[in-house]
Image (cartoon, helix red, strand yellow):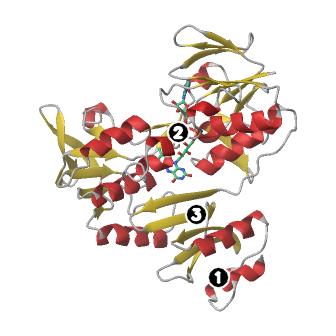
């Protein structure tokens, strides 16, 4: 049986590796638009950007892993059309690749500011792929001025890397606080304080009016209240959209992602979708996650299901972010929380914010608090009870629940 995967990143490689592990005879082809050998994205705005690790250290698998594992990797190859009836994918160079099972692992694309307000200018950047990281690293020189539009994790990580290199950074957030979509006010306040302690200016409730340009080059940001922020380059970190164009053209059901059932099958049962591009059922609603955990775990589940196991995908989400000296680790999903309880960690400076809904433990943001993170994850994975009273009582040993 031949499995063809469109996309060559976290989800695709996880699936290919698991499929090969489970089935020595499976035929596997990866169609990847990227020229590079598939690589990890998280280090692009962390260790790779800071120069601590080389590109070879961020590839998902070494280049010489694919051949011996009989995984055909088509690089710089874009899937352009899917003939579901004939089970054939056509590439942009005209090549045809037939499949028995097809997997969309097309990921997500960064949102860009419209050209009318300067989003097209050459020094207005997004941060999604290796090329973006290289361009930004080139601009992050001591004394340069950076405006980051959007106070989400990617924008804040880039702000941190730039500030560490002596760049003067201003973060412009339209909402009344940074991280509004993903974290509680307590976590946001800790991260804001961290950035401010390192000289980053954070403007919250600040509406972007337009990017100011001189001779086709952005040289600042103008806010709705007419504040002007001078900048030598700009990063827009305003979220991503699932890459569903090809799936939509192929007639698959899409709604904020390629819609899949709990077995990760799309509306065509011979086609799966995994990773950032997939919208899947989670506790009675449809969600999409943008994380390495989700991409990897969906890849593993899809591999089992391609071989006929019929496994349900039931994740316990986790995520991390590195900014300055902070390692933030997040266990669970905080959606719909109505209570946050903060607990000091065992180590100096460590603390965690625990989220509850109707008294049920949902998630924890752990700031330099690896011990609490491990416990929170195990509690969630084991379906164990944790109450807000236990969290608030610092004499109570959370580990005793495991
Ligand atoms: C800078 C950055 C930092 C991040 N940090 C973290 C972090 O700390 N922790 C965390 O958990 N997550 C992090 N993430 C998110 C994480 O990287 C994503 O969730 C993950 O990459 C999703 O993997 P994916 O395989 O689903 O999709 P993607 O990584 O988006 O890859 C999809 C691939 O498909 C290719 N493709 C699309 N269409 C076609 C086509 N038609 N033909 C061929 N190829 C195609 C694209 O070129 C792309 O390479 C970060 C992301 C970025 C950008």
For marks 3 and 2 on the same chain, the one whose residue lies earlier in the sequence: 2
Question: Is 355 above or below relative to 208?
Answer: below
Q: Which mark is residue 391?
A: 1
Q: Secondary structure at mark 3?
A: strand
Is 74 placed left or right of 4 in the picture? left
Q: How many numbered badges does the structure rendering display?
A: 3
Q: Are marks 1 and 3 in contact (CB under 8 Å)?
A: no
Q: Position of residue 395 (x, y in %)?
A: 65, 92
Residue that numbered label 3 is attached to: 330
- Whether the residue under disc 2 has CB within 8 Å of ligand 1: no
Residue beneath the point at 41% across and 50% down: 45
Q: Can I make out residue 327 in this image?
A: yes
Q: Which mark is residue 39?
A: 2
Residue beneath the point at 81% across and 38% down: 304
Question: Is 33 above or below relative to 61?
Answer: above
Q: Nearer the viewer, mark 1 or mark 2?
A: 2
Q: Secondary structure at mark 2?
A: loop
Q: Nearer the viewer, mark 1 or mark 3?
A: 3
Q: Can I make out residue 339 in this image?
A: no
Q: Nearer the viewer, mark 3 or mark 2?
A: 2
Is 391 placed left or right of 127 in the picture? right
Q: Which mark is residue 213?
A: none
**Quick one: label 1, few (<14), some, or many (20+) residues within 10 Å?**
some
Q: CA distance from mark 1 to mark 3?
A: 16 Å
Q: Are marks 3 and 2 in contact (CB under 8 Å)?
A: no
Q: Secondary structure at mark 1?
A: helix
Residue that protrudes farthest toward the bottom in the picture: 395
For marks 1 and 3 on the same chain, the one whose residue lies earlier in the sequence: 3
């Amino acid at each position: 049986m031949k499995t063809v995967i469109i996309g060559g990143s976290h989800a695709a490689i996880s699936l290919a590796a698991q499929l090969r592990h489970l089935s020595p005879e499976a035929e596997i082809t990866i169609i990847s638009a990227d020229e590079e050998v598939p690589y990890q994205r998280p280090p692009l705005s962390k260790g790779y950007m800071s120069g601590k690790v080389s590109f070879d250290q961020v590839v998902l698998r070494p280049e010489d892993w694919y051949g011996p594992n009989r995984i055909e990797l088509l690089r710089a190859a874009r899937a352009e059309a899917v003939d579901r009836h004939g089970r054939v994918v056509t590439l942009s160079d005209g090549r045809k690749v037939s499949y028995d099972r097809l997997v969309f692992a097309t990921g997500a694309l960064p949102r860009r500011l419209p050209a009318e307000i300067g989003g097209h200018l050459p020094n207005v950047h997004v941060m999604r792929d290796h090329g973006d990281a290289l361009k930004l690293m080139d601009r992050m020189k001591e004394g340069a001025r950076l405006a980051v539009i959007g106070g989400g994790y990617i924008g804040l990580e880039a702000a941190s890397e730039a500030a560490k290199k002596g760049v003067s950074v201003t973060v412009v957030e339209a909402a009344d606080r940074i991280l509004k979509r993903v974290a509680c006010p307590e976590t946001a306040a800790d991260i804001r304080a961290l950035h401010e302690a390192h000289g980053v200016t954070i403007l919250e409730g600040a509406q972007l009016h337009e990017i100011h340009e001189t001779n086709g080059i952005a040289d600042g940001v103008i806010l709705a209240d007419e504040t002007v922020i001078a900048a030598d380059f700009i990063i827009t970190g305003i979220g991503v959209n699932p890459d569903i164009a090809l799936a939509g053209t192929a007639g698959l059901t899409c709604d904020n992602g390629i819609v899949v059932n709990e077995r990760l099958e799309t509306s065509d049962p011979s086609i799966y979708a995994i990773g950032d591009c997939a919208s899947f059922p989670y506790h009675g609603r449809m969600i999409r996650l943008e994380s390495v955990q989700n991409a990897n775990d969906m890849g593993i589940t899809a591999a089992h299901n391609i071989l006929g196991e019929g496994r349900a995908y039931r994740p316990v989400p986790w995520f991390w972010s590195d900014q300055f000296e902070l390692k933030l680790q997040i266990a669970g999903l905080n959606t719909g929380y109505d209570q946050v309880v903060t607990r000091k960690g065992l180590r100096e400076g460590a603390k965690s914010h625990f989220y509850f809904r109707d008294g049920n433990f949902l998630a924890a943001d752990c700031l330099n608090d690896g011990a609490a993170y491990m416990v929170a994850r195990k509690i969630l994975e084991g379906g164990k009870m944790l109450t807000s009273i236990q969290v608030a009582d610092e004499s109570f040993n959370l580990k005793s629940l495991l």
